[in-house]
Image (tube, helix red, strand yellow):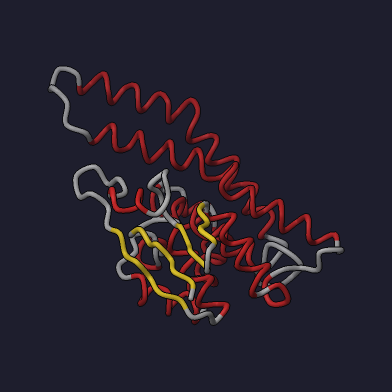
């Protein structure tokens, strides 16, 4: 049986969703973030040296990195359902979006999250104006424009495609879901991207997504946060 090591409010949610889409038997080992630091607990280092989630075990296989997990599960258990034919041009569209989600879209969103935490962190009152100014300048000069560039790109693609690849729902859509949910719930920019909002709502309405929400528990980037 597949075991998913699941960290609350993380990329783990989309792996749980993928398992539900594939109709696989699985069990979930829940790991909770530290309430003060919001970092993953030490328990995850017993599973994988980096101490991050998601991680799955499938027999003797221990696999980390959400993109690798999505690709493994889709190719092993759902090739016909969730992937284009390997000898078709759409295959490389799938490979592109699989890596784009974490390699291009997620880094500026993660940096924005880190800077927001820096801004909210307790510091001496006389340092606060300097911290706020640095965060604001980095956001204005770099992060906001980078996020906008990527969301413009995704919005443009979705304006003429119902799904990312091959005209049908697939593994690439699951992989892209987390950064788009994070963008809608954290950046305050969602109102400028109606097609992304409709697309995310379409993903979140899938029965398997809803089952995954029940299995995983409270999820900060779910439907209530992205409406």
Q: Residue at x 47, y 74 (%)?
A: 209
- Picture coordinates of residue 70, whole percent (x, y): 58, 62
- Picture coordinates of residue 16, whole percent (x, y): 46, 69
> Which is more toward the observer, 44 or 163?
44
* Image quarter of residue 115: top left
56 over 136 or under it: above or below: below
- Picture coordinates of residue 109, whole percent (x, y): 46, 42
Q: Residue at x 32, y 37 (%)?
A: 116
111 over 27 or under it: above or below: above
42 over 121 or under it: above or below: below
Left or right: residue 24 versus residue 50 is right
Count of numbered circles in the view:
0
- Picture coordinates of residue 122, whole percent (x, y): 16, 31
Q: Residue at x 13, y 22 (%)?
A: 124
Residue pushed farthest left? 125
> Which is more toward the observer, 88 or 126?
88
> Which is more toward the observer, 186 or 41?
41
Quadrant containing the C terminus is bottom left
């Amino acid at each position: 049986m597949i075991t998913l090591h699941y960290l609350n409010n993380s990329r783990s949610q989309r792996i749980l969703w993928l398992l539900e889409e594939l109709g696989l038997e699985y069990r979930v080992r829940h790991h909770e973030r530290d309430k003060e630091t919001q970092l993953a607990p030490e328990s995850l280092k017993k599973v994988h040296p980096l101490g991050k989630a998601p991680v799955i075990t499938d027999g003797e296989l221990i696999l980390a990195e959400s993109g690798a997990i999505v690709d493994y599960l889709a190719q092993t258990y759902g090739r016909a359902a969730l992937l284009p034919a390997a000898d078709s041009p759409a295959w490389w569209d799938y490979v592109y979006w699989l890596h784009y989600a974490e390699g291009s879209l997620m880094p500026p969103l993660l940096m924005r999250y880190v800077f927001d935490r820096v801004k909210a962190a307790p510091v001496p009152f006389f340092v606060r104006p300097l911290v706020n100014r640095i965060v604001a300048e980095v956001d204005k000069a770099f992060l906001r424009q980078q996020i906008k560039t990527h969301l413009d790109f995704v919005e443009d693609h979705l304006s003429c495609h119902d799904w990312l690849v091959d005209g049908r729902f697939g593994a690439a859509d699951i992989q892209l879901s987390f950064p788009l949910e994070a963008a809608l719930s954290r950046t305050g920019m969602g109102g400028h991207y109606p097609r992304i909002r409709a697309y995310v709502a379409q993903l979140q309405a899938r029965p398997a997504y809803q089952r995954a929400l029940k299995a995983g528990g409270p999820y900060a980037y779910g439907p209530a946060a992205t409406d």
